[in-house]
Image (cartoon, rainbow, N blue to C red):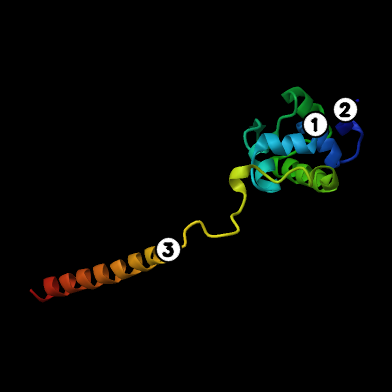
Protein backbone atom coordinates (compact mmCIF):
# COMPACT_ATOMS: atom_id res chain seq x y z
CA UNK A 1 0.00 0.00 0.00
CA UNK A 2 1.20 3.50 -0.82
CA UNK A 3 2.33 5.59 2.16
CA UNK A 4 -0.34 8.09 1.21
CA UNK A 5 -3.14 5.51 1.30
CA UNK A 6 -2.96 4.95 5.07
CA UNK A 7 -5.97 7.10 5.94
CA UNK A 8 -3.89 9.88 7.48
CA UNK A 9 -2.89 13.14 5.89
CA UNK A 10 0.62 12.69 4.45
CA UNK A 11 3.50 13.95 6.54
CA UNK A 12 6.63 15.59 5.17
CA UNK A 13 8.51 12.28 4.80
CA UNK A 14 5.57 10.79 2.85
CA UNK A 15 5.48 13.80 0.53
CA UNK A 16 9.25 13.55 0.02
CA UNK A 17 9.01 9.83 -0.89
CA UNK A 18 6.16 10.39 -3.35
CA UNK A 19 7.49 13.49 -5.14
CA UNK A 20 11.28 13.19 -4.80
CA UNK A 21 11.77 9.45 -4.32
CA UNK A 22 15.00 7.98 -3.01
CA UNK A 23 17.19 11.04 -3.51
CA UNK A 24 18.81 12.30 -0.34
CA UNK A 25 18.17 15.91 0.64
CA UNK A 26 21.78 16.77 -0.23
CA UNK A 27 21.48 15.19 -3.69
CA UNK A 28 18.22 17.04 -4.23
CA UNK A 29 19.69 20.41 -3.25
CA UNK A 30 22.74 19.92 -5.44
CA UNK A 31 20.59 18.93 -8.43
CA UNK A 32 18.36 21.97 -8.11
CA UNK A 33 21.32 24.35 -7.86
CA UNK A 34 19.50 27.28 -6.29
CA UNK A 35 20.76 29.50 -3.50
CA UNK A 36 17.97 28.96 -0.95
CA UNK A 37 15.85 26.04 0.19
CA UNK A 38 12.72 27.77 -1.04
CA UNK A 39 14.21 28.39 -4.47
CA UNK A 40 15.36 24.76 -4.73
CA UNK A 41 11.95 23.37 -3.84
CA UNK A 42 10.02 25.83 -6.00
CA UNK A 43 12.25 25.17 -9.02
CA UNK A 44 11.62 21.45 -8.54
CA UNK A 45 7.84 21.63 -8.05
CA UNK A 46 7.13 24.35 -10.65
CA UNK A 47 7.52 22.15 -13.77
CA UNK A 48 5.64 19.15 -12.30
CA UNK A 49 2.42 18.40 -14.20
CA UNK A 50 -0.82 19.72 -12.66
CA UNK A 51 -4.51 19.30 -13.26
CA UNK A 52 -6.89 21.71 -11.53
CA UNK A 53 -4.02 22.60 -9.20
CA UNK A 54 -3.35 19.00 -8.18
CA UNK A 55 0.27 17.91 -8.64
CA UNK A 56 0.67 14.59 -10.43
CA UNK A 57 2.42 11.74 -8.65
CA UNK A 58 4.10 8.94 -10.61
CA UNK A 59 0.92 8.71 -12.71
CA UNK A 60 -2.39 10.54 -12.82
CA UNK A 61 -4.12 7.32 -11.83
CA UNK A 62 -2.04 7.08 -8.65
CA UNK A 63 -2.67 10.76 -7.94
CA UNK A 64 -6.44 10.41 -8.09
CA UNK A 65 -6.57 7.03 -6.34
CA UNK A 66 -4.74 8.42 -3.33
CA UNK A 67 -6.87 9.53 -0.42
CA UNK A 68 -5.38 13.03 -0.61
CA UNK A 69 -4.58 14.95 -3.77
CA UNK A 70 -1.95 17.56 -3.03
CA UNK A 71 -1.72 20.99 -4.60
CA UNK A 72 1.61 22.61 -5.40
CA UNK A 73 1.74 24.73 -2.22
CA UNK A 74 1.16 21.61 -0.10
CA UNK A 75 3.93 19.76 -1.92
CA UNK A 76 6.28 22.74 -1.50
CA UNK A 77 5.43 23.02 2.18
CA UNK A 78 5.96 19.27 2.70
CA UNK A 79 9.33 19.24 0.91
CA UNK A 80 10.53 22.29 2.85
CA UNK A 81 9.41 20.70 6.11
CA UNK A 82 11.31 17.51 5.25
CA UNK A 83 14.44 19.53 4.48
CA UNK A 84 14.12 21.28 7.84
CA UNK A 85 13.64 17.95 9.67
CA UNK A 86 16.76 16.52 7.99
CA UNK A 87 18.86 19.70 8.14
CA UNK A 88 21.54 18.11 10.35
CA UNK A 89 22.18 15.46 7.66
CA UNK A 90 22.95 17.85 4.80
CA UNK A 91 23.62 21.36 6.13
CA UNK A 92 27.39 21.05 6.62
CA UNK A 93 27.89 19.69 3.10
CA UNK A 94 25.64 22.12 1.20
CA UNK A 95 26.48 25.75 0.73
CA UNK A 96 24.58 26.36 -2.47
CA UNK A 97 26.19 26.66 -5.88
CA UNK A 98 29.41 28.72 -6.08
CA UNK A 99 27.85 31.46 -8.21
CA UNK A 100 25.50 32.35 -5.35
CA UNK A 101 28.17 32.84 -2.70
CA UNK A 102 27.89 36.37 -1.33
CA UNK A 103 31.05 38.46 -1.66
CA UNK A 104 32.35 39.75 1.67
CA UNK A 105 34.33 42.60 0.12
CA UNK A 106 33.28 45.01 -2.63
CA UNK A 107 34.44 43.98 -6.07
CA UNK A 108 34.99 47.61 -7.15
CA UNK A 109 36.46 50.27 -4.86
CA UNK A 110 35.82 53.23 -7.18
CA UNK A 111 32.91 55.32 -5.83
CA UNK A 112 33.07 58.01 -8.54
CA UNK A 113 30.97 55.82 -10.83
CA UNK A 114 27.93 56.03 -8.54
CA UNK A 115 28.05 59.86 -8.31
CA UNK A 116 28.10 60.48 -12.05
CA UNK A 117 24.62 59.11 -12.97
CA UNK A 118 22.79 61.25 -10.36
CA UNK A 119 24.55 64.40 -11.57
CA UNK A 120 23.65 63.46 -15.14
CA UNK A 121 20.00 62.97 -14.21
CA UNK A 122 19.80 66.34 -12.46
CA UNK A 123 21.26 68.11 -15.52
CA UNK A 124 18.94 66.26 -17.90
CA UNK A 125 15.89 67.03 -15.76
CA UNK A 126 16.76 70.75 -15.63
CA UNK A 127 17.27 70.90 -19.41
CA UNK A 128 13.96 69.19 -20.19
CA UNK A 129 12.13 71.46 -17.69
CA UNK A 130 13.52 74.57 -19.43
CA UNK A 131 12.45 73.21 -22.83
CA UNK A 132 8.93 72.52 -21.57
CA UNK A 133 8.62 76.02 -20.06
CA UNK A 134 9.85 77.59 -23.30
CA UNK A 135 7.28 75.62 -25.39
CA UNK A 136 4.34 76.63 -23.18
CA UNK A 137 5.23 80.34 -23.26
CA UNK A 138 5.34 80.44 -27.10
Instruction: State the image coordinates of residue 23 (x, y, percent, origin top left).
Output: 78, 31
Is residue 51 visible in the rendered structure shown here?
Answer: yes
Distance from the alpha carbon under mark 3 to that under mark 1: 52 Å
Local packing at callout 3 (Cα closer than 10 Å; few below 14, some 14-19, many 20+) is few
Q: Is mark 2 on a helix, strand or loop?
A: loop
Q: In percent of the image, x 76 and y 32: which residue is there?
A: 20
Looking at the image, is 6 positioned above or below residue 113? above
- Which numbered tag is attached to residue 110? 3
Q: Which of pointers 1 and 2 indicates the residue nearer the eye?
A: 1
Indicate left or right for 48 with 14 as reference.
left
Name the mark on residue 89.
Answer: none
Does residue 23 lie above or below 100 as drawn?
above
Could you tell me residue 131's position as x and y percent? 16, 70
Residue at mark 1 to residue at mark 2: CA–CA distance: 9 Å
- Using the image as rendered, state which of residue 97 and residue 7 is in the foreground: 97
Q: Name the residue under label 2.
A: 2
Count of marks overlaid on the render: 3
- 3 left or right, relative to 43: right
Q: Position of residue 124 (x, y in %)?
A: 25, 67
Position of the N terminus, as image quadrant, is top right
Give the mark nearer the N terminus: 3 vs 1.
1
Residue 10 visible somewhere in the drawing: no
| Residue 18 - label | 1
**Which residue corresponds to the image point at 67% horizontal and 48% vertical from the top-left?**
36
Q: In which quarter of the image is residue 55?
A: top right
Instruction: Tell me: residue 102, above or below residue 44.
Output: below
Lower sequence index among marks 3 and 2: 2
Q: Are marks 1 and 2 in contact (CB under 8 Å)?
A: yes
Question: Which of label 3 and label 2 is nearer to you?
Answer: 3
Q: Quadrant of the C terminus?
A: bottom left
Tell whether 116 sits left or right of 40. left
Amino acid sequence: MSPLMTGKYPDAADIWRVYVGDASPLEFLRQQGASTLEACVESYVDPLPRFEGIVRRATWTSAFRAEYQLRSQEVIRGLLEHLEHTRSEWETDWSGPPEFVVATEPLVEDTSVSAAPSEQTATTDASSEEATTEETTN
